[in-house]
Amino acid sequence: MTTNDDKVILVVEDDDTLLQTLAYNLKQEGYRVITASTGPDGLEAGRTQSPDLIVLDVMLPDLDGLSVCRILRREADVPIIMLTARSSEVDKIIGLDSGADDYITKPFSFGEFLARVRAALRRRVSHAPTNQLVSANLSIDLISRKAYKEGNLLNLSFKEFNLLVELMRHKGAVLSRDLLLTKVWGYDYYGESRTVDVHIRWLREKIEENPSKPTRITTIRRIGYRFEE
């Protein structure tokens, strides 16, 4: 058994068989597991139990998983993996726009599920509070609000700096345009999401070796962007 006893995973699933199966297998891997079978119970557990990761079914009684995800995302930065029987691209986009970090379509193998769990937990560790963010030749000092490429100070606007911070904090994860708007421009921003594309283009011109063929900030078609590790 692996030593994951300090990691707490909340599983919210109304299918009791699947809930117990996931809980059992996660415990076998050494994780501490909390379970809930309704939206309100999952929301309460997410708020009070401080899980390191939440596995959240989309279709839940009383309060659906997407609503739970949106509420928790406003209150905490805990990784959220959505589970759903829906496999269309539109459903995945809706899930990611709600603030989910990953999306798994049923049925799935436990091997795939566990790999997604490990990846989400690794990203959480790499996002632990720190005064600096570093990725290859890029570095950010969060206290002085200065960003550097190969040691040279980058001339970033206020929004460009915040956008780069958000991307680097979640490197390897797909961030939707709406999520970036919420994080960088605020919940009360009502402009078009294409403003994200404009700022991404400006940011690429400052950090990419070849802005027309970006390798650091890649576009995920019809969803958003990913900062490559």
Image (tube, helix red, strand yellow):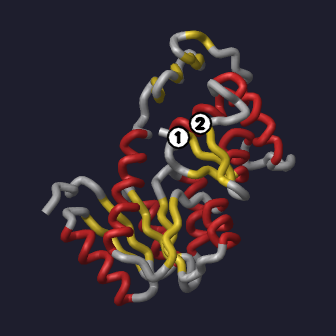
Q: Is residue 32 left or right of residue 36?
A: left
- Location of residue 156 by image quarter: top right
- On the image, the x and y values in percent for residue 2 come to 16, 58
For marks 2 and 1, give the one nearer the viewer. 2
Q: How many marks?
A: 2
- On the image, the x and y values in percent for residue 64 come to 59, 78
Residue at 51%, 76% in the rendered image:
105
Which of disc 1 and disc 2 is earlier in sequence? 2
Q: Is residue 1 left or right of residue 124?
A: left
Residues 27 and 37: in front is 27
Q: In this view, does 121 lie to the left or right of 95?
A: left
Residue at 39%, 54% in the rendered image:
119
Mark 2–mark 1 distance (CA, rounded to whole Å): 7 Å
The amino acid beneath tag 2 is Thr
10 Å crowding of disc 1: few (<14), some (14-19), many (20+): some
| Figure check: 22 above or below 92 | below
Residue at 85%, 49% in the rendered image:
192
Q: Is residue 167 left or right of residue 188?
A: left
Residue at 74%, 22% in the rendered image:
157
The amino acid beneath tag 1 is Glu
- On the image, the x and y values in percent for residue 121 come to 37, 52
- Say if mark 2 contacts mark 1, CB within 8 Å: yes
Q: What element carries label 1?
A: loop
For label 1, the residue is 228
What numbered label is drawn on residue 215?
A: 2
Q: Quadrant of the N terminus?
A: bottom left
Residues 71 and 142: in front is 142
| Figure check: 173 above or below 208 | below
Q: Is mark 2 on a helix, strand or loop?
A: loop
